[in-house]
């Protein structure tokens, strides 16, 4: 499949020749062949109109028909895995085995949502039968279910060129719910994005769907994304990225004449709490595994543990030497973009100059050069220091983490109370630790979307129960998730039908239940 560098507007390619840009190989710092062109104003208008025109027919498709579409996309991506991995590796320098795994995850997500909509109960159908004999007033017949919102804009993420990008979780969940999707491709991996986008477009055509069901727009800056968020035909946005970019787009979404939901997954430091019992039993083991977690993928996972709470230093005798040794032996890592590298280096240099923070250890540091390289750096402070400088708990995107020593239970709980919203929190402890620190679990329920026990937060299982979200700034709506089958609910809204004849109702609400889905009927679940 040839890469043309053109945005995809329905079944047509953009004619724009403005704003040319290229991808860069992070491992060498060299420009990759192929020029990409930023979408024009006409492209944005065309993609939005095509998506809006496609909405009425796509939204009315039966679940099994939309499931066929998602399954076809998954099969198509599997058939071109070698091509995708080769291009993504060139554009991101992520290891090929990781990218093969990510391709499999992307296809698994698509099939998960296909199974959900084919079964059909996700629409939360509810039926309250009427009663014309009720006194003093007759009771109306009331039925409700979820319906799609309309065209959804999805922003590709830098750190997952497949699983959180063009065919990633936001796209899969929005398409599953019945919404056309316009993807704003991430400029760090435009070739990968185009290959996936063209594959999806082929599937749209093969399934006989309206051409506006899917679109893909390029831009090396912020202009196209801002125009899409503000476009009156767009009804929701899915975003994964930095707090700065996410907050700017969220403000645009809510300041429109017609505000729309903005589902952003943004910054998170993912605190880890190592309790005394676990430290005494497994200190050395935890140190080694923690190092592997915060350096995984060059520290560019949104679930990277960037803040680690330790009991008093005398009880961490096994942990600290092992942790320092692991950090000191760390190789350099290749970061995804020159911007990420520059931001990481600025933050590390700033932290090295702080009086309230001490450098614990650092790994091999890169010499000057074109490659987007960064070295591992770990720092330490104590709870009073963290409380005086809450900015120490902000995310640093890259292979760095901060150890925070607590003196007693009260200090640890004070630190937990001070935290803002995060995607995850992790507790390492024994059953006795959990009893002694039971208040910690309660506090963390109000701070994060997922609590991990005796594990590590990197690695997010795609399943029905998974929650990948959290209070702000981890995400813009803590009631939702961007991973797992519950992500579909972000892109749907409830609609109620009162006193409609059975023949005019959607199949999900008809008395005979022709789809055989689970429904709440007069207060009881039934099939």
Image (cartoon, rainbow, N blue to C red):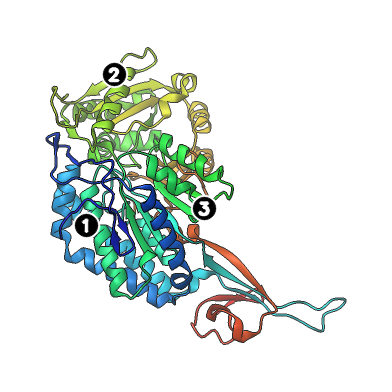
Q: Residue drawn 15% across and 31% down? A: 371
Closer to the observer: label 1 or label 2? 1
| Nearer-the-camera pick, 400 or 186 | 186
Q: Do the residues labelled 1 and 3 touch (CB within 8 Å)?
A: no
- Residue 232 image label: 3
Does residue 464 appear in this view? Answer: no
The earlier-in-sequence mark between 1 and 2 is 1
The residue where tag 2 is placed is: 349
The earlier-in-sequence mark between 1 and 3 is 1
Closer to the observer: label 1 or label 3? 3
Q: What element carries label 3?
A: loop
| Nearer-the-camera pick, 289 or 463 | 463
Q: Are marks 2 and 3 in contact (CB under 8 Å)?
A: no
The residue where tag 1 is placed is: 195
Q: In which quarter of the image is the N terminus?
A: bottom left
Q: Position of residue 269 (x, y in %)?
A: 39, 35
Q: Residue drawn 46% across and 47% down? A: 229
């Amino acid at each position: 499949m040839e890469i043309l560098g053109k945005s995809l507007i329905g079944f047509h390619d953009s004619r724009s020749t403005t704003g040319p840009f290229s991808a860069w190989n992070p491992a060498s710092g060299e420009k990759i062949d192929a020029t990409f062109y930023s979408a024009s104003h006409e492209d944005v208008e065309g993609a939005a109109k095509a998506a809006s025109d496609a909405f009425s027919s796509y939204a009315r498709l039966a679940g099994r028909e939309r499931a066929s579409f998602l399954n076809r996309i998954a099969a198509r991506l599997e058939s071109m895995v070698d091509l995708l991995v080769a291009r993504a590796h060139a554009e991101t320098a992520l290891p090929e085995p990781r990218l093969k795994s990510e391709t499999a995850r992307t296809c698994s997500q698509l099939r998960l949502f296909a199974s959900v909509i084919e079964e059909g109960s996700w629409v939360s159908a509810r039926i309250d039968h009427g009663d014309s004999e009720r006194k003093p007033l007759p009771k109306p017949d009331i039925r409700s279910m979820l319906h799609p919102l309309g065209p959804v804009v999805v922003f590709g993420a830098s750190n997952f060129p497949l699983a959180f990008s063009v065919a990633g979780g936001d796209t899969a969940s929005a398409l599953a719910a019945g919404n056309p999707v316009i993807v704003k491709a991430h400029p760090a991996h435009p070739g990968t994005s185009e290959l996936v986008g063209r594959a999806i477009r082929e599937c749209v055509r093969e399934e006989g769907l309206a051409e506006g069901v899917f679109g893909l727009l390029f831009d090396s800056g912020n202009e196209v994304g801002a125009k899409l968020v503000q476009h009156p035909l767009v009804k929701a946005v899915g975003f994964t990225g930095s707090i700065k970019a996410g907050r700017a787009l969220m403000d645009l979404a809510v300041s429109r004449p017609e505000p729309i939901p903005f589902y952003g997954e943004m910054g998170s430091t993912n605190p880890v709490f190592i309790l005394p019992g676990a430290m005494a039993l497994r200190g050395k083991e935890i140190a080694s595994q923690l190092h592997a977690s915060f350096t995984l993928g060059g520290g560019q996972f949104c679930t990277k543990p960037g803040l680690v709470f330790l009991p008093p230093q005398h009880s961490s005798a096994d942990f600290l030497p092992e942790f320092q040794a692991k950090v000191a032996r760390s190789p350099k890592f290749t970061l995804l973009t020159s911007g990420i590298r520059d931001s990481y280096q600025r933050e590390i240099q700033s932290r090295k100059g702080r009086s309230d923070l001490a450098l614990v250890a650092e790994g091999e540091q890169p010499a000057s050069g074109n490659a987007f390289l960064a070295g591992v750096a770990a720092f330490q402070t104590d709870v009073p220091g963290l409380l005086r400088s809450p900015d120490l708990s902000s995310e640093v995107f890259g292979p760095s983490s901060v150890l925070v020593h607590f003196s007693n239970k009260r200090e640890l709980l004070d630190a937990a109370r001070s935290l803002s919203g995060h995607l995850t929190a992790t507790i390492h402890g024994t059953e006795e630790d959990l009893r002694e620190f039971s208040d910690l679990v309660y506090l963390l329920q109000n701070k994060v979307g997922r609590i991990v026990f005796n594990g590590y937060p990197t690695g997010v299982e795609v399943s029905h129960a998974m929650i990948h979200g959290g209070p702000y700034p981890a995400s813009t709506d803590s009631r939702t998730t961007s991973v797992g089958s519950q992500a579909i609910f972000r892109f749907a809204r409830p609609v109620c039908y009162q006193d409609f004849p059975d023949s005019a109702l959607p199949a999900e609400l008809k008395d005979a239940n022709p789809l055989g889905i689970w429904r709440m009927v007069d207060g009881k679940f039934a099939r």
